[in-house]
Image (cartoon, rainbow, N blue to C red):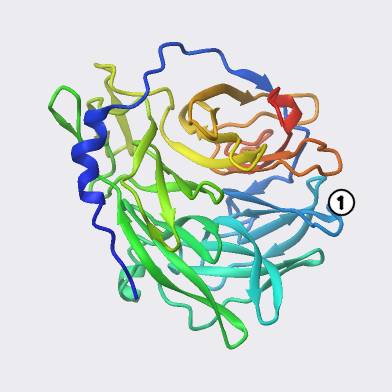
Amino acid sequence: MQRTTGIAALVALTTLAAGTPAFATQRAPREITAAVETPALFDDEDGADANADDPAIWVNQADKARSLVIGTAKNGGLRVYDLKGREVQSISTPEGGRFNNVDILTGFTFGKRKVDVAVVTDRGLDKLRVYRIEASGLTDITSAEAPLLFSKDQAEVEEQATGYGVAVYGRYAVVSRRHSTRLGIFRLEEKNGKVTYRTTDTLDLPREFRLPDGSTWSPCTEPGEDPQVEGMVVDAEAGVLYVAQEDVALWRINLAGGTFSSIPRIVERVREFGQPATFDPESEECTVEYTNGFGGRITADVEGATIYPTGKRDGYLIVSSQGDSRFFVYDRRTNKPVTIFSVVDGKKTDGVQHSDGAAVTSVALPGYPKGLLVLHDGENTPDEGRTNTNFKFVDWRSLGLGS
């Protein structure tokens, strides 16, 4: 049975009155370089319309050297890489499909076995796709009867307000809806040897905010669209979901089983928060006037979120500040800011610009003894005069943080 949470209506009236942490100093980011990069993906006919977006890391517990990085390539489907960044598998989308985000669920009960699966949002078809992961590659185990995530019918799917971001925990997937503030929780279930899902809860983040001066503000978006969410990560040990609402803020929401169990609270707002802005239909961009101090440090969009654990509750939360190609690191337990870094050009790889997705593991892997951080690069170079993206592999030690 679907359960719709009634707590979201309180958010716009209460969260901003309380405010969020003030960050008085804007420290210079630590500059690091990537150790490895994956092959270029080109978003054109010759490149099969492949556009890198979101990575996930699968740790092969039986043989760490055969661990895999799985990345979405939108119309280009899924790409699977080894730890040296070499492509080892390419998976096409079903007809009409467009793969947006991916996350890994370990120990999923499938038949009489525990398996690891990759859960992917197909924003073209408004469905989840589920792939069993083995060292030899990925196998699609999605039920042909899997329902639409948010759309009521195919006509609504065509409008493309469809499944977008994803974060998994237990037997559940949290999915955001494109061009909307809606989040849904879906329980993954086996049926006739395949995997389907059903909705267990929904939540709408606010689209309008009351500012400390008593005025109201809505983020600048394309007409007819609401401020959407893409980047998400679940801290399963703490029962917390972190949500990156692109033009608004990084939020935290408590989870209980397959439900949202608390009023969303802001960890940090974007710089543009509360600022007057005008949408330019020609450039399809917003012109922002910075007239007050209501915003935070993150430059919109706030994007990919991932957690590096150092203990049961300790570690780091990393998010992408896409607008200025930086990454913000917070203490996992307290959400207090720790550091800022950017990935710059090095001897072996170029830097990371306008990053969408991020994934990290603290497990020691060959070449990455303290863990691996994988980041989407939205402007890979050299670009050959074509839209060019890929993924960068970063040695965790280069961040200079504890483990």
Q: Is residue 189 left or right of residue 149?
A: right
Tell me where residue 373 appears, x and y as whole percent.
Answer: 68, 38
**Image height of 153 relative to 392, above or below:** below
Q: Is residue 245 visible?
A: no
Q: Is residue 141 above or below residue 290?
A: below
- Residue 136: give x, y in percent of width and height: 81, 66
**Residue that extends furthest to the bottom in the rendered view of this protein:** 192
Q: Residues within 10 Å of mark 1 (few under 14, many from 20)?
A: some
Most extreme residue toward the front is 312
Q: Measuring 63% from the left and 67% from the top, which residue is drawn there?
A: 92
Which quadrant: the C terminus?
top right
Front residue of 17/71: it is 17
Residue occupying image coordinates x 25% and y 45%: 206
Q: Badge 1 is on which residue? A: 65
Compare residues 198 and 70 and report the one nearer the observer.
198
Q: Quadrant of residue 90?
A: bottom right
Residue 117, compared with residue 217, is above or below; it is below
